[in-house]
Every structure is written in structure tokens, then in C-alpha cells.
Image (tube, grey):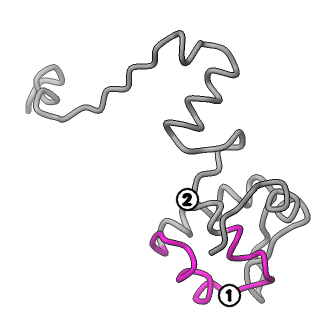
Amino acid sequence: MPQPRTACINVPRRHHHFDAATYPLTLDGLRRIADETWKVDEQGLGNSDREYLRALSNGRRGFTNLTPLVRVGQDEIRTVIEPYLLQLGFINITPRGRELTEMGKRKISEEPFAPL
């Protein structure tokens, strides 16, 4: 069994250098890093989350009708996107399909979304 010290030698790394002048270690600096580098908003929503919310903006949808509108796989929708949006209170999953909550509708109305 390789030692932990040598096991990672050939693993490529992605190095991000955050200049303190550009990205100060303040709340504003961290928001800028999240927005520009990780492409997430203050609530941690990324592009896939926003696509999912946009897909529900016209009303309730079943899972099979929803998945073609979001550019990730079904597994990612079920295991990553939906649990997080449920936790934030932006969606409900009902026997009749997925739907936006009032909080989800407010979130969509406050963000400048590009059309699908």
C-alpha cells in the first residue's frame, strides 16, 4: 500500500491564486471569489440550480418532463440539486410533480435569468 505522502504525487492539482488586493479576506472578497470562481450566488446556487428553478417557473412538472430542461444528468438532479433546493425551501416534491414554493418564486423574480 502506498504511503499517503507518495500516493498523491502524480495527481494533477488546480491552483487558484487569490491576490489579496483583488480578493481581500472580507465578506465582500469571499462573495467575489464565490461569484467569479465558483459561479455561485450568496445562497450557493449554481447554473444548474438556476436552470432547474427556471424550468419550474411555468408551473408544476413531472421528473421526466423536467430532466430534459436541465443540462445535467438525472442522478445529479436527484442527489444534488433537488435536496439542496428542498433544504432552502425553494421547491416541493408532490405526487403530481415538482413545483416552486413562494420562496422559489421570489428567488426567480429577483434574479436576472436568461431565457431557456
Residue 23 or residue 90, whichever sits in front: 23
Residue shown at 61% from the left, 29% from the top: 32
Task: Locate residue 71 relative to residue 115 in the image: left or right.
Answer: left
Above or below, 109 relative to 43: below
- Based on the picture, tell me whether residue 75 belongs to the magenta stretch: no
Image quadrant for the C terminus? bottom right
Which residue position is annotated with label 1? Answer: 62
Residue highlighted by disc 2: 80
Residue 57: quarter of image: bottom right
**N-terminal label among 2 and 1:** 1
| Mark 1 neighbour class, 10 Å CA radius: few under 14, some 14 to 19, many 20 or more | some
Residue 96 drawn at (x, y percent): 77, 89
Disc 2 residue type?
Answer: Val
Which amino acid, mark 1? Gly
Q: What kind of element bears circle 2?
A: helix
Q: Residue at x 56, y 69 (%)?
A: 78
- Nearest the viewer among 115 and 27 is 115
Q: Position of residue 48 (x, y in %)?
A: 56, 61
Q: Residue at x 54, y 63 (%)?
A: 79
Farthest right residue in view: 102
At mark 1, the secondary structure is: loop
